[in-house]
């Protein structure tokens, strides 16, 4: 960057509120050049560096000033909490999300008396953008700020250890500065994962014969089930055909009953039509009766007129006897006519009533027969409907049983296919062993053989040496056969690993490994040109009376063909600091374990002890811990 323009991640200012011995302190730094902070002892110079580390994510014990964050709060704080703010420049092409944060990123950490702490990540305008540690780590990674690296932030304790410490302390400082210790922890976790996977593979191979036998038994049962299923299917088909025939018969019966019902309904309609005709006849009789009554009324009116005229006629009778007699004869005839009409009317009324009663009785009887027949047909229809419903329910049950049988058949076929794939993989592994004989690489498994073939085919594409698997480069020395299990436990995490000299060779090797790269370890070792010597004073400082010549280290029991592999084993597995014993009693009798301050310790430059049965003894903080090395995949 041009002079005067700050780099992304450079510190702009540090502000402390109720932190250690500062009530309120603010310091602004120049963007480039050197900033000096000076003052007498106890004035708070180290508190500024501690605040910077704590605000950017360091733990309290890493500062060397406290073991808990609450210890950093000023003792007379008003609200019982401390606040630290660090402003970082955020300009230039490598700035982190300038559209959100602007030209500055302000990191604020608030520490409470309970030891709890929280972050706020603010923009240059004071807006809160984030509140989590994950977002803070993302910012620090993007701006290349390494607060835990002693090269970036050198505390007084780290500087004393670097200037006054021994070679081991300086080496630890180097490992932290280059972040190799974090890489080693990641590699160790990957090695443990690989060991667990190898154990899973060994268990799977042990149960493979049982699974094959289960497959044969399942296949036999499956064939028998198919034959039984075919017979059962035929029985069910015949039952379905029988039910279908019964259904057709019932349907024919229902149709016949329906036709009879239609005939009865036609008869009822015919009777109703006759009833309507009788009602029309009765209505006509009523009309005729009314007409007869009108004629009678007219006759009565005529009779009244005749009676009115009777006097006149009586007077004229004498004069007109003959007309009177004629008139009387006319009256008699009219009366006889009226009586005849009355008798006819009475006779017709009786006949009409009789016909109406007969029609009503016949209709009632026919209607009762029809209703009884209708109820019988409805009862039979309901019975047929229930039978049809039961048949459909049974068909649904049969369909469900068939579907369950199909699912079980699909599951059995899937299991058989899975077992067949496992058998093919084991046959491929066996074929690799047969093809390559009892070579060192073939003893490490078919994946190691295939990867070695790929490496040999592409050997001209590698820049430097590519050595591996490490297990193929190791051999036992004469007379060391008793330590085979112990050596396998001590070296197991590295037996399947490869060693290269350049990062591009490591990437190419992982690319060749393909999907197996998660289990493949590839170590990059640049100083592989010549074999390294042992660490200075590598032989342990033994207590008085202990013969160091009788101790057997791992590198005393093996020979390594490749200098590159030897250097890798010395760095990764500490083969010159790991010693072999027959059992724990032999360790106790040897006198190498020192009891001090109530704890057990190993001498310097003796990192661990491995017993003949593969048990590994590690002494940490005065306590003895036992671990068991992973089996499988042996070396040379």
Image: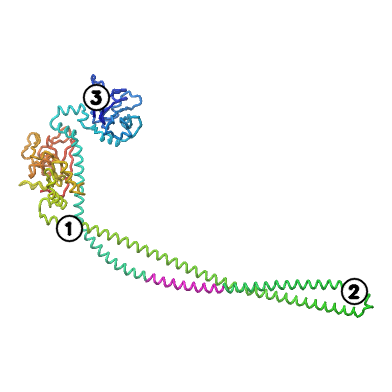
| Residue 592 x %, y % | 11, 37
Q: Quadrant of residue 594?
A: top left
Residue 22 against residue 406 in the figure, above or below: above
Q: Are marks 1 and 3 in contact (CB under 8 Å)?
A: no
**Which sits in the foreground, 192 or 299?**
299
| Crowd tier of the residue under label 1, counting other residues whose Cα lies within 10 Å: few below 14, some 14–19, many 20 or above | few
First reached walking from the N terminus: tag 3 or tag 2: 3
Can the viewer see residue 351?
A: yes
Q: Which residue is mark 1?
A: 427
User: Label for residue 310?
Assistant: 2
User: Of helix, strand and loop, which one carries label 1?
Assistant: helix
- Magenta: main secondary structure equals helix
Residues in magenta?
Answer: 238-264
Q: Nearer the viewer, mark 2 or mark 1?
A: 2
Q: Is residue 263 magenta?
A: yes
Q: Which residue is mark 3?
A: 46
């Amino acid at each position: 960057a041009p002079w005067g323009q700050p780099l992304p991640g450079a510190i702009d200012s540090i502000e402390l509120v109720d932190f250690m011995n500062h009530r309120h302190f603010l310091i602004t730094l120049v963007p480039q050049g050197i900033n000096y902070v000076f003052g007498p002892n106890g004035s708070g110079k180290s508190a500024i560096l501690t605040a910077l580390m704590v605000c950017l994510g360091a733990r309290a014990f890493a500062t060397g000033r406290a073991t808990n964050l609450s210890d950093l709060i000023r003792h007379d704080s008003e609200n019982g909490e401390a606040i630290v703010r660090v402003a970082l420049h955020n300009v230039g092409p490598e700035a982190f999300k300038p559209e959100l944060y602007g030209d500055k990123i302000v990191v604020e950490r608030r520490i409470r008396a309970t030891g709890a702490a929280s972050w706020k990540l603010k923009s240059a305008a004071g807006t809160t953008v984030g509140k989590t540690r994950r977002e803070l780590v993302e910012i620090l990674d993007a701006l290349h700020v390494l607060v835990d690296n002693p090269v970036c932030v050198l505390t007084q304790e780290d500087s004393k250890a670097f200037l006054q410490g021994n070679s081991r302390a300086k080496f630890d400082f180097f490992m932290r500065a280059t972040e190799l210790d974090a890489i080693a922890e990641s590699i160790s976790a990957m090695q443990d994962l690989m060991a667990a996977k190898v154990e899973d593979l060994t268990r799977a191979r042990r149960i493979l014969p049982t699974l094959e036998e289960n497959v044969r038994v399942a296949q036999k049962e499956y064939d028998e089930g198919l034959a039984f299923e075919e017979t059962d299917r035929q029985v069910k088909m015949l039952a379905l055909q029988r039910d279908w025939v019964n259904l057709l018969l019932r349907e024919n019966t229902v149709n016949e009953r329906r036709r009879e019902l239609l005939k009865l309904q036609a008869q009822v309609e015919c009777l109703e039509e006759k009833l309507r005709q009788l009602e029309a006849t009765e209505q006509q009789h009523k009309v005729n009766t009314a007409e007869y009554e009108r004629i009678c009324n007219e006759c009565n009116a005529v009779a009244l007129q005749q009676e009115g005229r009777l006097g006149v006629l009586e007077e004229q009778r004498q004069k007109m006897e003959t007309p009177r007699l004629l008139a009387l004869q006319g009256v008699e005839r009219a009366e006889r006519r009226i009586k005849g009409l009355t008798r006819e009317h009475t006779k017709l009324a009786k006949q009409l009533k009789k016909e109406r009663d007969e029609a009503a009785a016949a209709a009632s009887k026919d209607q009762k027969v029809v209703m009884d027949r209708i109820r019988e047909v409805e009862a039979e229809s309901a019975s047929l409907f229930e039978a049809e419903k039961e048949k459909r329910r049974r068909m649904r049950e049969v369909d469900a049983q068939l579907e369950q049988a199909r699912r079980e058949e699909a599951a059995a076929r899937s299991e058989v296919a899975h077992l067949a794939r496992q058998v093919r993989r084991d046959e491929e592994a066996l074929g690799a062993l047969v093809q390559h004989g009892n070579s060192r690489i073939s003893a490490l498994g078919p994946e190691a053989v295939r990867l070695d073939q790929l490496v040999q085919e592409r050997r001209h594409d590698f820049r430097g040496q590519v050595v591996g698997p490490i297990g193929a480069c190791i051999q036992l020395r004469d007379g060391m056969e008793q330590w085979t299990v112990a050596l396998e436990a001590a070296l197991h995490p590295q037996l399947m690993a490869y060693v290269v000299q350049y990062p591009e060779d490591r990437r190419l090797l992982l690319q060749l490994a393909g999907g197996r790269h998660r289990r493949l370890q590839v170590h990059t070792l640049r100083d592989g040109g010549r074999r390294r010597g042992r660490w200075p004073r590598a032989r342990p400082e033994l207590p008085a009376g202990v013969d160091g010549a009788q101790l057997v280290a791992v590198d005393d029991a093996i020979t390594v063909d490749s200098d590159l592999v030897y250097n890798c084993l010395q760095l990764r597995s500490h083969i010159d600091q790991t010693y072999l014993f027959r059992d724990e009693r032999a360790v106790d009798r040897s006198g190498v374990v020192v009891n001090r301050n109530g704890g057990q310790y190993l001498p310097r430059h003796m990192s661990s002890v491995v017993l003949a049965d593969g048990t590994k003894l590690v002494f940490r903080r005065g306590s003895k811990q036992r671990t068991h090395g992973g089996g499988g995949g042996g070396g040379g």
